[in-house]
Image (tube, grey):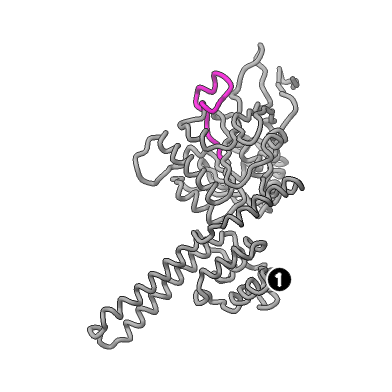
């Protein structure tokens, strides 16, 4: 992954990211800095200043304080990666520095044969022990029962006041009313047969959350990032991707589409990424850790490979992927929303948990499942439906429900709309 700190060093980017992540929790940032040694940082004055503020005043300094005190323009530092990413870079730098020091100490000996083997062994042991201690930083954030109790009470207070920022809203009122939104650690599925609009529903949700200011990571395992962005722009404008492919788009519509692309471009908290020709679990989870989003959307999760190697069957692979994504949602404390397919049995009637493709793990792991009805002909001549019928077929927190979404905007509608001989009729 290409580093983009806009001229800032690893330390400065790390400081900015850690302040951004733990601004309201000095205990967590204190644990992090305490675990890292002062000599690992090039900017020791800034390190000591932050430590002092946390230790004496139990507060994390604001960006403007560091900016004024040390004459650094924080706005020039781009930190799209997680704290863990910068910790890994600092660990690597520490190892390199340690090896260089050790090599120099050996090189200073005029007669290598005179070096005592025990003296040679001790610095290696010390270096490995120190490096292992720093490596364990990822596991250093185990919270006490007291901290967990405080968090639980805060959730209750947020529910009473209506200011529950943990829950991420959906763009569909019926789903929102039934679930309250999705919370960190929850695994949600949007399921449907090919061509039933599950991808567009996923895009609609991702864009809605990003527009609310949340940090969104959107994966597409079937197409490039630019193709994904283009489809998102088409969704927002009501224009068809096919008009671009077959070159029937007008100049006016092209201008509208390009303006929408620029609008999406302005959403700095929307991250669209692809994982290459071999979308593996390792790549997916690595990107989630790097970008530290508030929520993750994965289109076509059934194309993810559980491992780059191995001979798992499709069902075994899908089960492993589902289990791992659920575990990632819990361990990384973020909601994950995936699009998967129904099997052919779903066409014979209303889809159910039993018709989710490939594995029972999808149904077991999901907190919520949104299922889109396959196309069904009604009447003679068969009218063309302009809406999708969406069922909530699993809801761990509340009641099941059904609602309709427009095929053009994917917003919830109060009625089903059909086109008969070119005339739209609402039922």
Q: Residue at x 49, y 63 (%)?
A: 137
Q: Which residues are magenta?
A: 338-355
Residue 246 seen in render: no
Q: Quadrant of the C terminus?
A: top right
Q: Is residue 282 magenta?
A: no
Residue 241 position (above or below residue 70): above
Is disc 1 surrounded by few (<14), some (14 to 19) or many (20+) residues within 10 Å? some
Q: Residue at x 65, y 68 (%)?
A: 76
Query: For the view shown, which residue lies furthest in the bottom direction?
Result: 110
Residue 32 position (above or below residue 337): below
- How many numbered callouts? 1
Q: Nearer the viewer, residue 107 or 204?
A: 107
Query: For the view shown, which residue lies furthest in the top direction?
Result: 380
Q: Residue at x 26, y 79 (%)?
A: 117
Query: For the view shown, which residue lies furthest in the left direction?
Result: 113
The answer to which image quadrant residue 53 occupies is bottom right
Q: Label 1: state its secondary structure.
A: helix
Q: Position of residue 398 (x, y in %)?
A: 65, 33
Q: Position of residue 11 (x, y in %)?
A: 56, 71
Q: Nearer the viewer, residue 57 or 91?
A: 57
Q: Position of residue 127 (x, y in %)?
A: 39, 73
Q: Nearer the viewer, residue 246 or 15?
A: 15
Query: For the view shown, which residue lies furthest in the front direction?
Result: 146
Q: Position of residue 65 (x, y in %)?
A: 70, 73
* Residue holding disc 1: 64
Q: Nearer the viewer, residue 298 or 273?
A: 298
Q: Residue at x 68, y 73 (%)?
A: 67
The answer to which image quadrant residue 121 occupies is bottom left
Residue 183 seen in render: yes
């Amino acid at each position: 992954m290409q580093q983009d700190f806009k001229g800032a060093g690893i330390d400065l980017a790390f400081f900015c990211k850690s302040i951004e992540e733990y601004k309201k929790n000095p205990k967590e940032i204190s644990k992090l800095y305490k675990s890292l040694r002062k000599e690992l940082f090039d900017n020791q004055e800034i390190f000591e200043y932050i430590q002092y503020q946390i230790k004496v005043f139990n507060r994390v300094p604001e960006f403007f304080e560091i900016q004024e005190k040390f004459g650094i323009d924080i706005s020039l530092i781009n930190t799209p990666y997680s704290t863990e990413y910068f910790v890994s870079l600092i660990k690597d730098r520490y190892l390199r520095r340690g090896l260089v020091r050790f090599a120099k100490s050996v090189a200073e000996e005029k007669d290598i044969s005179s070096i005592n083997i025990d003296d040679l062994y001790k610095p290696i042991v010390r270096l490995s022990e120190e490096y292992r201690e720093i490596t364990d930083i990822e596991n250093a954030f185990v919270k006490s029962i007291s901290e967990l109790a405080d968090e639980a009470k805060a959730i209750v207070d947020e529910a009473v006041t209506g200011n529950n920022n943990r829950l991420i809203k959906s763009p569909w009122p019926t789903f929102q009313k039934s679930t309250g939104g999705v919370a960190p650690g929850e695994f949600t599925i949007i399921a449907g047969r090919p061509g039933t609009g599950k991808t567009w529903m996923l895009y609609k949700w991702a864009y809605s959350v990003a527009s609310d200011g949340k940090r969104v990571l959107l994966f597409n395992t079937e197409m490039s990032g630019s193709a994904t962005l283009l489809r998102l722009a088409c969704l927002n404008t009501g224009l068809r991707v096919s008009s671009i492919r077959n070159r029937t788009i007008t100049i006016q519509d092209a201008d509208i589409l390009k303006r929408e692309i620029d609008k999406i471009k302005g959403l700095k908290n929307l991250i669209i990424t692809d994982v290459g020709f071999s979308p593996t679990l390792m790549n997916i989870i690595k990107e989630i850790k790097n970008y530290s989003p508030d929520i993750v959307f994965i289109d076509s999760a059934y194309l993810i490979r559980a491992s780059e190697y191995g001979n798992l069957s499709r069902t075994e692979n899908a089960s492993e992927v589902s289990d791992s994504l659920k575990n990632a949602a819990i361990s990384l404390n973020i909601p994950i929303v995936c699009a998967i397919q129904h099997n052919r049995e779903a066409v014979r009637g209303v889809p159910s948990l039993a018709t989710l493709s490939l594995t029972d793990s999808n149904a077991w792991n999901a907190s919520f499942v949104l299922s889109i009805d396959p196309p069904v002909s009604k009447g003679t001549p068969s009218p063309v439906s302009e809406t999708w019928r969406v069922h909530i077929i699993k809801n761990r927190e509340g009641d099941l429900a059904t609602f309709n979404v427009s095929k053009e905007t994917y917003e919830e509608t109060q009625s089903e709309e059909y086109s008969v001989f070119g005339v739209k009729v609402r039922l």
